[in-house]
């Protein structure tokens, strides 16, 4: 069975989700630390792609609210093209506007600290990582839903 890997690319972390186009469901998978070099990111993703039997990446494209591409979108596009080339895998880009907000609503606020106060740095980091992989699932689910609505085959999904 081949799967799609959803990617929520951040400056420090990469949220990942896996989805099966035959059943149309995406689920959060993992959050990995983003490397300084795209080659190192590619090596980390290579292991996930092999382990999860992934045939295509769906990378969230951070468009601005008007639908335009700013610096972050251009940077993401460049990263996605490099990853696709290095891993020899098709890459689709998916508008990710509001995906993190949807993920935050799904997960709720970070858990309180042990004494009932604000969460400490470790709890905040753990919660942020959960949001990143949930956002990747939102991005991937949007792509799966769009493909199902148009009857698009996985092999036609390359952009």
Image (spheres, helix red, strand yellow):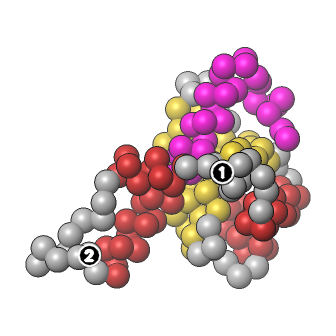
**In which quadrant of the rendered view does residue 48 lie?**
bottom right
**Mark sitting on residue 65:** 1
148 vs 68, left or right, is left
Q: Are marks 2 and 1 in contact (CB under 8 Å)?
A: no
Residue 64 appears at what percent x and percent y? 69, 55
Image label count: 2
Quadrant location, the N terminus: top right
- Whether residue 157 is in magenta: the answer is yes
Question: Secondary structure beneath disc 2?
Answer: loop
The residue labelled by disc 2 is 119
83 vs 30, left or right, is right
Question: Secondary structure beneath disc 1?
Answer: loop
Residue 97 appears at what percent x and percent y? 62, 49
**In which quadrant of the rendered view does residue 43 lie?**
bottom right
Select label 2 or label 1 by which is in front.
Answer: 1
Q: Quick one: label 2, few (<14), some, or many (20+) residues within 10 Å?
A: some
Viewer-nearest residue: 117 or 86: 117
Specify which label sits upstream in the sequence, 2 or 1.
Answer: 1
Viewer-nearest residue: 53 or 127: 127
CA separation in Å, label 2 and label 1: 31 Å
Residue 83 appears at what percent x and percent y? 80, 61
**In which quadrant of the rendered view does residue 76 lie?**
bottom right
Q: Looking at the picture, does residue 64 appear above or below residue 129? A: above
- Whether residue 63 is in magenta: the answer is no
| Chain part drawn in magenta | 135-159
> Would you say residue 18 is visible in this rendering?
no
Residue located at (53% from left, 38% from top): 26
Q: Looking at the picture, does residue 88 appear above or below residue 25? A: below
53 vs 125, left or right, is right
Residue located at (71% from left, 82% from top): 36
């Amino acid at each position: 069975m081949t799967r799609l890997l959803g990617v929520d690319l951040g400056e420090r972390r990469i949220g990942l989700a896996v989805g099966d186009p035959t059943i149309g469901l995406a689920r959060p998978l993992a959050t990995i630390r983003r490397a300084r070099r795209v080659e190192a990111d590619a090596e980390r993703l290579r292991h996930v792609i092999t382990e999860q039997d992934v045939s295509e990446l769906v990378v969230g494209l951070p468009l601005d609210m008007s639908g335009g591409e700013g610096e972050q979108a251009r940077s993401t596009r460049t990263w996605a093209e490099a990853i696709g080339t290095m891993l020899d895998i098709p890459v689709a880009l998916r508008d990710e506007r509001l995906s993190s907000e949807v993920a935050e609503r799904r997960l709720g606020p970070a858990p309180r600290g042990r004494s009932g106060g604000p969460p400490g740095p470790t709890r905040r980091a753990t919660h942020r990582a959960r949001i990143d992989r949930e956002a990747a699932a939102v991005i991937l689910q949007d792509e799966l839903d769009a493909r199902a609505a148009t009857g698009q085959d996985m092999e036609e999904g390359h952009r």
